Amino acid sequence: MTAAETKNKLVRSITEEQLSAFLGELVASPGVDGPMIKEKALEKFGVSIGNDSANQFRKEVFGKYVEKLRRAAQMSKTVAEHRKDGQVNTLADASSDLLQQALFEFMVESDLDFNNPKDVEKAEAISRMIKAARSEDRRMIEQLDKRVKELEDQHREAEKALQAASGKQGGISDDTIKAVRQALGMSTEA
């Protein structure tokens, strides 16, 4: 939050860097309340604020900051869940999920008026973002499908080569064939 976006005296009186550091300090402090913020504002920045301003800072500025941290933790959890599940392209999958969730939340929280050209423009931009995410998902699925088919073809070719080699007189030993099958993730049964 910038000074231009708020009427809060404390936010208007300090730099964005100071605000960020102050919010980080408050998160690490137990029992954050209006009187604590009022006291720290005077102590750290020499800014005297009233009880209403301190409470407004706690509810709006600090509250939004805590919510942002909660969302970041949720993002981290989503990425970790994708990794835990062993899914391919985990970061892309998690990012797509998070983008779609953020867009959904924005749509729910905003009061878009479709009679207002600016709101229609916002909705169209959101629609394009969702379409791009879905298009990327489809492209990724097509690439993965192609790669699976390539691996299946390679598997069949390797199987044919192993069968041909094992059938030749003086060919590859059964132990070597078994080791190759095992290394390729194939059944070790001939």
Image: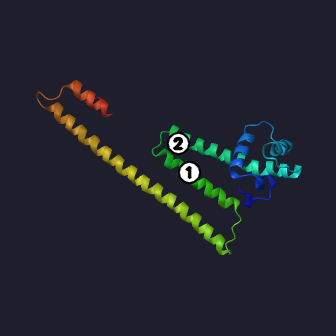
**For this rendering, which residue is in front, 177 or 72?**
72
**Does the rendering let one see residue 155?**
yes
**Horizontal relation, residue 166 to residue 49: left or right:** left
Q: Residues within 10 Å of mark 1 (few under 14, many from 20)?
A: some
Q: Is residue 1 above or below residue 41?
A: below
Locate residue 111: give its quadrant.
bottom right
At a point 73% along the width and 44% down the height, the residue shown is 22
Which residue does the numbered mark 2 point to in the structure image?
A: 82
Callout 2: helix, strand or loop? helix
Q: Residues within 10 Å of mark 2 (few under 14, many from 20)?
A: some
Q: Position of residue 123 (x, y in %)?
A: 62, 67
Q: Amino acid at mark 2?
A: His
State the CA–CA distance, disc 1 to disc 2: 10 Å
At a point 81% along the width and 38% down the height, the residue shown is 31
**For this rendering, which residue is in front, 11 or 107?**
11
Tell me, yes or no, whether the two marked residues, 1 and 2, touch with CB atoms within 8 Å.
yes
Q: Is residue 34 above or below residue 187?
A: below
Q: Amino acid at mark 1?
A: Asp
Mark linked to residue 97: 1
Total marks shown come to: 2
Q: Residue furthest right?
A: 51
